């Protein structure tokens, strides 16, 4: 999920309200004046900066750290430092596009920022291969999660605003699988099918930190709901299910990965080799042993047999940062990257050990189908994804402006191998 506030600082800093820097067309950075007062969340942001600074020189994806730090510095009103970091990030030619990042809204009229965007667009031009597969009648769903049931040939779509789960038939008919209000659900995010019995699992959480994992049978009857027993702030986001019954969850607000034991109905953290920052997408390889966790700084591969973990190296001129929905497909990671500025859909073929990227393929970029994509699902050799989630029209779990709502589009793009 990509939680939204009135102006989101990066796709992985859900609680920050962006600082605005008013500029005139053509201003140079040195001429930007009147920096705003330090925001109320400055201490939290500085703590996040300290975390990323510790990791910056050991991460294989340096651009991810630079982009994160640039947005954080801009949020604090440190514009010159933000621009310096951003220029260094863009010079790496990894695909970061600051034009789509709300934190940099106040820089858009500056000459230096414009030159950076021009260089990014030359390196990473429009790719428009996707087509619209389904369109919802309801405008106020604000969808977040998507899953595909191969046996029934149907999709499941989760709704943040309506707090329900929708089923989409093969001919594009939308019906309620779990109607709004029936089970008093929180906003519904990641959704996946159990590989053993086809039942449906989903994560729910509010921006204030209430969260739970819910389980439904194939008829939409609630089988169970589970929440952490501690007093920490949690935000269960995406999830995968292993053949042994374990449910593994990204906990975005607690910056952790949690394992749910169905026998004891308890949650326990998964140990990782480094701190993670706003974990979001998660994928499980077909061997049921390689787990991939996406955060603001890249992708971590976890060997579930040995418990060891390491960062996946994206290679030169590529980035694995900012995955929202992320999925395993024939030795590759496929999904939506909306934490790199302007969102895109991309596929990354991995080495046999899963520790490095061998080929990067941009599937959709700067098109009508990347308005604000979030997650997706693989059906055969095609990737279906939410093209216009409208999450930027929500705050505090409510729609801000109902007049801006539009029919939700599910787009489809053919996978390259």
Image (cartoon, rainbow, N blue to C red):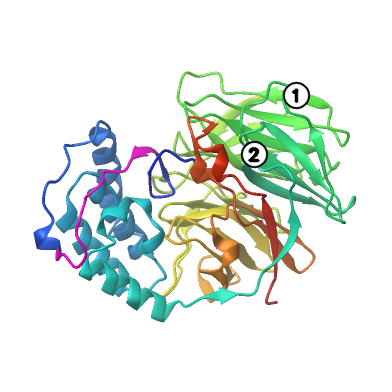
In this rendering, would 326 be left or right of 8? right
Residue drawn at point x = 21 percent, y = 61 percent: 83
Please identify the quadrant where the C terminus is shown: bottom right
Q: Can residue 265 be seen?
A: yes
Q: Which residue is nearer to you in this view: 110 or 359?
A: 110
User: Quick check: 271 above or below 122?
Assistant: above
Magenta-colored stretch includes residue 85: no
Mark 1 or mark 2, earlier in chain = 2
Spatial CA span between label 1 and label 2: 27 Å
Q: Which residues are magenta?
A: 15-28
Q: Can residue 60 be seen?
A: no
Q: Which element carries disc 1, helix, strand or loop?
A: strand
Please identify the quadrant where the N terminus is shown: top right
Q: Residue 362's x, y, as percent?
A: 55, 73
Q: Which residue is nearer to you in this view: 34 or 360?
A: 34
Q: Residue 217's x, y, as percent?
A: 84, 33
- Dot 1 corresponds to which residue? 224
- Dot 2 corresponds to which residue? 140
Residue drawn at point x = 62 percent, y = 48 percent: 406
> Which image quadrant for residue 29?
bottom left
Q: Which residue is nearer to you in this view: 81 or 231?
A: 81
In this rendering, would 79 be left or right of 364? left
Residue drawn at point x = 34 percent, y = 64 percent: 63
Q: Residue 77's x, y, as percent?
A: 19, 46
Q: Are marks 1 and 2 in contact (CB under 8 Å)?
A: no
User: Quick check: 254 above or below 113?
Assistant: above
Magenta-colored stretch includes residue 21: yes
């Amino acid at each position: 999920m990509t939680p939204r506030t009135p102006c989101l600082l990066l796709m992985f800093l859900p609680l920050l309200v962006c600082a605005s820097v008013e500029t005139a067309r053509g201003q140079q950075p040195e001429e930007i004046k009147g920096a705003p007062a330090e925001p109320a969340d400055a201490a939290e942001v500085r703590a996040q900066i300290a975390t990323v600074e510790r990791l910056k020189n050991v991460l294989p994806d340096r651009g991810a750290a630079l982009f994160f730090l640039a947005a954080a510095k801009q949020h604090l009103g440190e514009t010159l430092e933000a621009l310096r970091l951003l220029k260094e990030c863009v010079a790496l030619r990894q695909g970061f596009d600051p034009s789509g990042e709300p934190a940099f809204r106040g820089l858009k009229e500056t000459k230096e920022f414009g030159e950076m965007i021009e260089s990014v667009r030359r390196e990473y031009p429009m790719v428009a291969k996707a087509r619209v597969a389904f369109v919802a009648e309801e405008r106020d769903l604000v969808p977040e999660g998507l899953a595909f049931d191969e046996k029934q040939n149907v999709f499941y779509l989760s709704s943040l605003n309506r707090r329900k789960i929708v089923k989409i038939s093969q001919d594009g008919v939308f019906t309620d699988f779990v109607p709004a209000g029936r089970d008093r659900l929180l906003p519904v995010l990641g959704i996946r099918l159990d590989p053993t019995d086809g039942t449906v699992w989903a994560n729910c959480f509010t921006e204030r930190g209430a969260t739970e994992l819910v389980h439904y049978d194939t008829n939409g009857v609630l089988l169970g709901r589970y929440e952490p027993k501690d007093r920490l702030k949690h935000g269960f986001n995406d999830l995968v299910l292993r053949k042994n019954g374990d449910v593994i969850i990204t906990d975005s607000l607690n910056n952790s990965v949690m394992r749910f034991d169905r026998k004891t109905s308890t949650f326990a953290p998964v140990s990782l080799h480094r701190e993670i920052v706003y974990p979001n997408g998660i994928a499980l390889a077909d061997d049921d042993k390689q787990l991939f966790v996406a955060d603001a700084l890249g992708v971590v591969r976890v060997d579930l047999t040995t418990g060891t973990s390491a960062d996946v190296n994206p290679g030169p001129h590529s980035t694995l940062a900012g995955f929202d929905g992320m999925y395993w497909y024939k030795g590759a990671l496929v999904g939506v990257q909306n934490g790199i500025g302007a969102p895109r859909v991309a596929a990354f073929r991995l080495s046999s050990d899963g520790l490095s990227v061998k080929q990067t393929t941009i599937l959709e970029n700067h098109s009508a189908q990347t308005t604000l994509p979030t997650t997706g699902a693989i059906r055969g050799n095609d990737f279906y994804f939410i093209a216009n989630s409208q999450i930027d029209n929500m705050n505090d779990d409510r729609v801000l402006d109902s007049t801006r709502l539009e029919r939700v589009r599910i787009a489809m793009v053919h996978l390259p191998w």
